[in-house]
Image (cartoon, rainbow, N blue to C red):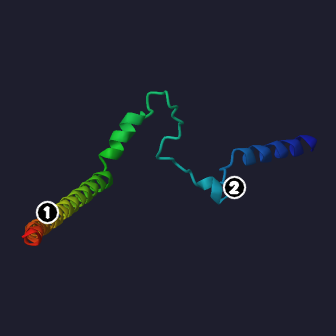
Amino acid sequence: MKNILSAIFIFKILLTACSKKESPGFAAEQDVKRNYDTIAVDSFSTGAVSVDIARKIRMSSPQYLDSVKQAKKLQEEESKLKAELEKENKAKQEEEKKKADAEKKKKSVETPSGPDSKTQ
């Protein structure tokens, strides 16, 4: 009897050990696959991007190029405004000089006639 009981016990252990295993839960069923590289890149390694290359990449971006164009337009507008202001200022100065010259001529014409009339 002991032999039969021990044989049944061993047979049950073998059946449970060789049976189909079920997953313990929901978390074990999901295999998460990463599509990106998780290896850290040292700044001195072959995969690292140098500062010059990163600068070139930034400078070739459309946003940077648009901002450069916009800055050039603003500078051109400012230079045009400055040129117009300079022309206006020159014109005003010339008019003032002409007025001053005209006043000097009037004074010079009036002053000699005044003393001549007094001496006669």
Q: Tell me whether the residue at label 2 lies in contact with that at label 1, contact meaning CB atoms closer than 8 angstroms.
A: no
Q: Amino acid at mark 1?
A: Glu
**Rendered location of residue 110, percent (x, y):** 10, 71
- Residue plotted at (46% across, 46% down): 35
Q: Nearer the viewer, residue 38 or 46?
A: 46
Sort mark 1 into few (<14), some (14-19) or many (20+) by Cα contacts within 10 Å: few
- Regarding mark 2 in the picture, which secondary structure is present there? loop
Q: Position of residue 96 (x, y in %)?
A: 17, 66
Query: Is 49 positioned to the left or the right of 109 in the image?
Result: right
Which residue is rendered at x = 29% and y = 46% of the image? 60
Image check: 11 left or right of 39? right
Give 44 or 115, whichever is nearer the viewer.
Answer: 115
Residue closest to the eye, 118 or 106? 118
Q: Residue at x 54, y 36 (%)?
A: 40
Task: Return the residue at label 2.
Answer: 24
Assign a secondary structure to mark 1: helix
- Disc 2 versus disc 1: distance between alpha carbons? 97 Å
Question: In the displayed structure, would residue 33 be above or below residue 87?
Answer: above
**Picture coordinates of residue 76 (x, y %)?**
21, 57
User: Could you tell me which residue is drawn at 36 percent across and 36 percent down?
Assistant: 53
Looking at numbered disc 2 in the image, what kind of residue is underneath it?
Pro
In this picture, is 58 found above or below 120? above
Crowd class of label 2 (few under 14; some 14 to 19; many from 20; radius 10 Å): few
Residue located beneath label 1 in the image: 94
Q: Nearer the viewer, mark 2 or mark 1?
A: 1
Residue in front for this viewpoint, 26 or 3: 26
Q: Choose top left, top right, bottom left or bottom right for residue 82.
A: bottom left
* Residue 20 left/right relative to 11: left
Q: Residue furthest front?
A: 120
For the N terminus, which image quadrant? top right
Where in the figure is residue 67, as x and y percent of width and height? 30, 55
